[in-house]
């Protein structure tokens, strides 16, 4: 079946093209998101994509589906802007296009590569082990530079094709500097992201080391086939004991991705962070105002009021309010939602939707 598909690319350009549903098997997503494989027939090339959209099933129904789709779109825009003018890194899934304001909103993502990390835990060939570790840590470092915390790294969201890592599923991503909320799944879920934080752990705000807990546990799991549920399991494994020292400490004491890369002798400079953009707050407000007008039944909690850093944001919020740009650790959040918001407003002004 073929359709005419309208969407915006990551630069905000309106695109209209023929899309054909291929019928190819697509790894299922957990509701409230679904994915189908499409082939975009562009004038000069054919582009395979995954069309991800919300469904009224699963925990939270459509409201949760819209929040998760926003995470995919806004994280994808942020990464695209960070990599603008340079080759897009293979270590993170790529946003091709989106329509966040349609009657049935969607995101177009590049196809998945390789297999889920959980499928080869404990069996990864020796010659691939170092490449997997370096690839995963470089991907986390890239997210840090983009001001993003993935918050759900695990054996089902990280893939490996024998040469490259691909971090997928940004449905729970959030900006560094935002109040922490519940995200991820045990055992990869860091204590500060759990429904009830253990004594001595502060909910606080998202920091650049939030993904290190899950990344460290995943490295241990892929290399050994065991969960790192006890520090004693590192004993007798000197390479892992050295590499993973501190990764299951509280976030303020965890080593960063750069530090772990240095332990592997693979330190390299991260991409230059984006410069501040004053359009962010205005764009974010416009985005959620437009979403509320278009889909009030799913967007009534989309723009929560600012909260103190120590207080968790409501679980129903699309994403917590960010602090001012000059307070964001590791670089400001900038245009994560602003690009999408301004693009949506532009569409309405141009075509009168």
Image (tube, helix red, strand yellow):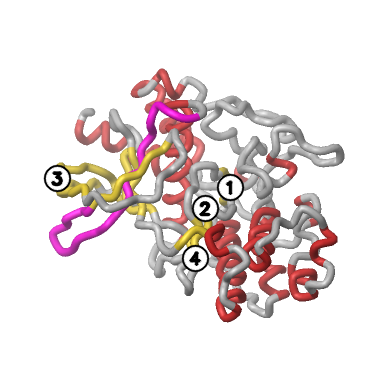
Mark 3 → mark 2, Cα distance in angstroms? 30 Å
Q: Position of residue 253 (x, y in %)?
A: 80, 56
Mark 2 closeness class: few <14, some 14–19, many ≥20 residues within 10 Å:
some
Q: Residue at x 62, y 47 (%)?
A: 176
Q: Are marks 4 and 1 in contact (CB under 8 Å)?
A: no
Determine which residue is flagged by label 2.
Answer: 157
- SS for dot 4: strand
Mark 1 → mark 2, Cα distance in angstroms? 7 Å
In this orientation, which residue lies closer to the viewer: 320 or 306? Answer: 320
Q: Position of residue 336 (x, y in %)?
A: 48, 46
Q: Which mark is residue 160?
A: 4
In this orientation, which residue lies closer to the viewer: 9 or 24? Answer: 24
Q: N-terminal of the two: label 4 or label 1?
A: 1
Q: Are marks 1 and 2 in contact (CB under 8 Å)?
A: yes
Mark 1 → mark 3, Cα distance in angstroms? 34 Å
Which quadrant of the figure contains the C terminus?
Answer: top left
Q: Residue at x 47, y 20 (%)?
A: 300
Q: N-terminal of the two: label 3 or label 2?
A: 3
Q: Are marks 3 and 2 in contact (CB under 8 Å)?
A: no
Which segment did they paint magenta? Answer: 39-58
């Amino acid at each position: 079946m073929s359709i005419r598909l309208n969407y915006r690319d990551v630069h905000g350009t309106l695109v209209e093209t023929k899309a054909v549903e291929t019928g190819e098997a697509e790894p299922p997503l957990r509701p409230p998101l679904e994915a189908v494989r499409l082939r975009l027939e562009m004038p000069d090339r054919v582009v395979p994509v995954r069309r991800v959209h919300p469904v009224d099933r699963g925990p939270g129904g459509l409201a949760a589906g819209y929040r998760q789709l926003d995470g995919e779109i806004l994280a994808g825009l942020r990464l695209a802007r960070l990599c603008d003018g340079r080759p897009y890194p293979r270590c993170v899934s790529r946003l091709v296009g989106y329509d966040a304001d349609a009657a049935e909103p969607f995101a177009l993502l590049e196809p998945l590569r390789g297999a889920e990390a959980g499928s080869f835990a404990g069996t990864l060939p020796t010659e691939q082990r170092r490449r997997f570790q370096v690839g995963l840590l470089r991907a986390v470092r890239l997210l840090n530079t983009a001001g993003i915390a993935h918050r759900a790294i695990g054996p089902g969201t990280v893939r490996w094709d024998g040469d490259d890592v691909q971090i997928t599923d940004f449905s729970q991503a959030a900006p560094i500097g935002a109040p922490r909320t519940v995200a991820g799944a045990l055992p990869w879920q860091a204590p500060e992201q759990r429904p009830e934080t253990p004594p001595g752990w502060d909910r606080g705000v998202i920091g650049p080391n939030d993904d290190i807990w899950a990344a460290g546990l995943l490295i241990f799991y892929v290399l050994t086939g065991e969960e790192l549920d006890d520090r004693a399991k590192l004993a007798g494994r000197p390479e892992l004991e050295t590499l993973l020292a501190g990764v299951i400490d509280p976030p303020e004491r965890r080593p960063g991705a750069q530090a772990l890369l240095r332990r592997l002798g693979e330190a390299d400079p991260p991409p230059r962070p984006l410069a501040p953009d004053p359009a962010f707050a205005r764009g974010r407000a416009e985005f959620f105002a437009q979403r509320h007008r278009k889909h009030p039944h799913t967007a009534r909690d989309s723009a929560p009021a600012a909260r103190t850093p120590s207080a968790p944001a409501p679980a129903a919020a699309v994403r917590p309010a960010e602090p001012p740009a000059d307070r964001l650790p590791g670089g400001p959040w900038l245009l994560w939602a602003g690009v999408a918001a301004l693009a949506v407003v532009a569409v309405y002004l141009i075509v009168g939707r």
